[in-house]
Image (cartoon, rainbow, N blue to C red):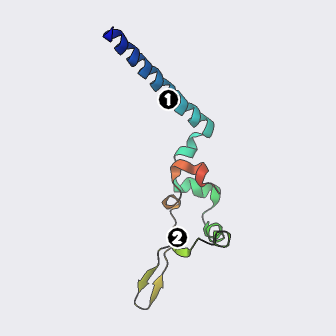
């Protein structure tokens, strides 16, 4: 009796595992494989090499958004520096392209 229960549990686990794998494959086919692993170069191929205006125009839309939400301000004797970030993946994870798509 115990052996039969163990066999049933193993079979159920195997069926669940196969169904899970199939569901992942179906989602990947439906969404397309590029949505899961974009690179900065692929971002730029669609969005262009300079998207600073697109991001800066978000400031009037969201009054809670500040320059320092995206940019680090570096103070040094005699002034400040605001480095530009060119790596899309710092803020837009490549694994959720559709969620980060503007």
Q: Identify the image quadrant of residue 7.
A: top left
Q: Is 27 placed left or right of 16 in the picture? A: right
> Please, what secondary structure does the residue beneath circle 1 have?
helix
Residue 20 — which label? Answer: 1
Q: Residue, x 51% and y 68% (percent of image)?
A: 85
Residue 45 position within the rendered picture, expressed as x and y whole percent measured from the top left = 61, 55
Q: Identify the image quadrant of residue 8.
A: top left
Residue at the extreme bottom:
78
Residue closer to the observer: 16 or 37: 16
Q: Which residue is mark 2?
A: 69
Marks 1 and 2 in Cβ contact (< 8 Å): no
Residue 58 position within the rendered picture, expressed as x and y whole percent measured from the top left = 64, 68
Q: Identify the image quadrant of residue 32.
A: top right
Q: Earlier in the sequence, mark 1 or mark 2?
A: 1
Quadrant where the N terminus is found in the figure: top left
Residue 7 — which label? Answer: none
Q: Residue, x 51% and y 61% (percent of image)?
A: 91
Query: How packed is label 1: few (under 14 Cα within 10 Å), some, or many (20 or more)?
Result: few
Residue at the extreme top:
1
Residue 71 position within the rendered picture, expressed as x and y whole percent measured from the top left = 50, 72
Q: Is 35 placed left or right of 76 in the picture? A: right
> Please, what secondary structure does the residue beneath circle 2 have?
helix
Q: Is 20 placed left or right of 60 in the picture? A: left
Residue at the extreme left:
2
Residue closer to the observer: 91 or 86: 91
Residue closer to the observer: 27 or 64: 64
Vertical comparison of 24 with 41: above or below: above
């Amino acid at each position: 009796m115990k052996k039969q229960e163990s066999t049933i549990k193993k079979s159920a686990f195997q069926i669940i595992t196969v169904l899970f794998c199939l569901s992942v494959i179906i989602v990947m086919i439906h969404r397309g494989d590029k949505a899961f692993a974009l690179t900065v170069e692929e971002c730029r191929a669609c969005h262009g090499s300079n998207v600073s205006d697109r991001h800066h125009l978000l400031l009037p839309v969201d009054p809670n958004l500040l320059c320092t939400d995206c940019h680090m301000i570096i103070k040094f004797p005699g002034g400040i520096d605001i480095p530009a970030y060119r790596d899309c993946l710092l803020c837009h994870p490549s694994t959720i392209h559709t969620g980060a798509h503007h």
